[in-house]
Amino acid sequence: MLDKHDLHHEFPEFEQEIRQLKMDNAHFARLFKEYHQINQQVHRIEVGVEPTSDEYLEQQKVARLHLKDELFSMLKKAQVTA
């Protein structure tokens, strides 16, 4: 079974911050949406629904990781200032 990589599963301790930033911070909301789209695509590739090259899959995983790092940084800042 494949692991879930959506932000709510990755960072359950930031549930409140995720909700708040999605409403109040347009940049966070855009990155969140982009992360979600890439995550869905990676999942579809991994389960065999969307065939593609291994290279493309790895590129998408790297993009997802960079977005996750940026979103995590924003979440940590939001938690500190809350």
Image (cartoon, grey):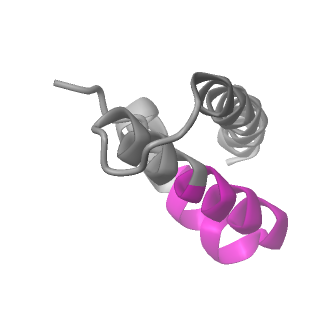
Quarter occupied by residue 77: top right
50, above or below 58, in the image: below
**Viewer-proximal residue among 66 and 77:** 66
Q: Please state if 35 lies on the left or on the right of 48 as rendered.
A: right
Q: Please state if 45 lies on the left or on the right of 81 as rendered.
A: left
Q: Residue at the location (71% across, 41% down)? A: 71
User: Percent x, y for residue 10?
Assistant: 43, 31
Q: Residue at the location (57% across, 23% down)? A: 54
Quarter occupied by residue 76: top right
Q: Quadrant of the N terminus?
A: top left
Quarter occupied by residue 18: bottom right
> How many numbered badges does the structure rendering display?
0
Q: Is residue 29 magenta?
A: yes
**Viewer-proximal residue among 68 and 47:** 47
3, above or below 22, in the image: above
- In this view, the residue farthest toward the left is 1
Q: Please state if 69 lies on the left or on the right of 38 as rendered.
A: right
Q: Residue at the location (44% across, 43% down)? A: 51
**Viewer-proximal residue among 61 and 7:** 61
Q: Is residue 32 magenta?
A: yes
- In this view, the residue farthest toward the right is 27
**Viewer-proximal residue among 7 and 25:** 7
User: Percent x, y for residue 17?
Assistant: 56, 52
- Magenta span: 17-37
The majority secondary structure of the magenta stretch comes to: helix
Q: Residue at the location (67% across, 33% down)? A: 56
